Image (cartoon, grey):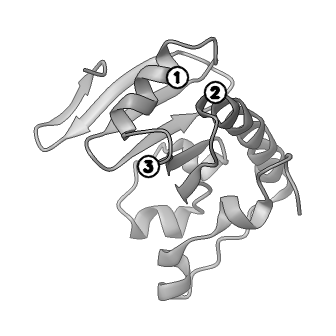
Amino acid sequence: MNLSAHFTLEELTRSETALRKGLDNTPDAETIANLTVLASGLEEVRALLGHPLHINSAYRGPKVNSAVGGSKNSAHMKGYAADFVCSAFGTPQEICHAIMDSTIQYDQLIYEFGAWVHISFDPQMRLSKLTIDGAGTRPGIA
């Protein structure tokens, strides 16, 4: 099922952890609507970067979120967040800076040091920027 021009429901609900542990990761109708919001935001990011995104993780049901050690309030569980890379564009840090320098509206942008970018499109649209690395979580993206 296509949620947007370049993102499908299957892509945004795929979970290696769910498959490996036999966990159901099927979203309900409300979450599918939220995933459509996420897909729309990811389309903006894809257009900005000029290359396809590789989605590492998007929707995570509560059991999957717990299995991966996700936050109890994770936007992934609501269908508003995705972790991704776009190596054809650059590093996760370069991607974060491109998004911050653009007009893209987001709720949270996290540079997960050296690994990937987390972006959420929760309707709060706080424009929150964080870095997560070996020292913990801190405000801003260097």
> Which numbered marker is on residue 99?
1
Above-or-below relation of 125 to 12: above
Closer to the eye: label 1 or 2: 2
Can residue 57 be seen at all in this image of the molecule? Answer: no
Percent coordinates x, y for residue 57 in the rendering? 53, 58
Distance from the alpha carbon under mark 3 to that under mark 1: 26 Å
Amino acid type at mark 2: Leu
Which corner quadrant holds the N terminus?
A: bottom right
Amino acid type at mark 3: Lys
Distance from the alpha carbon under mark 1 to that under mark 2: 8 Å
Closer to the eye: label 3 or 2: 2
> Which numbered marker is on residue 48?
2
Q: Are marks 1 and 2 in contact (CB under 8 Å)?
A: yes
Percent coordinates x, y for residue 60 in the rendering? 57, 60
**Alpha-carbon neighbours of circle 1 within 10 Å: few (<14), some, or many (≥20)?**
some
Percent coordinates x, y for residue 136 in the rendering? 17, 38
**Left or right of 29 in this view: 117:** left
Q: Secondary structure at mark 1?
A: helix
Q: Badge 3 is on which residue? A: 72
Residue at 38%, 39% in the rendered image: 92
Closer to the eye: label 3 or 1: 1
Marked residue nearer the N-terminal end (3 or 1) = 3
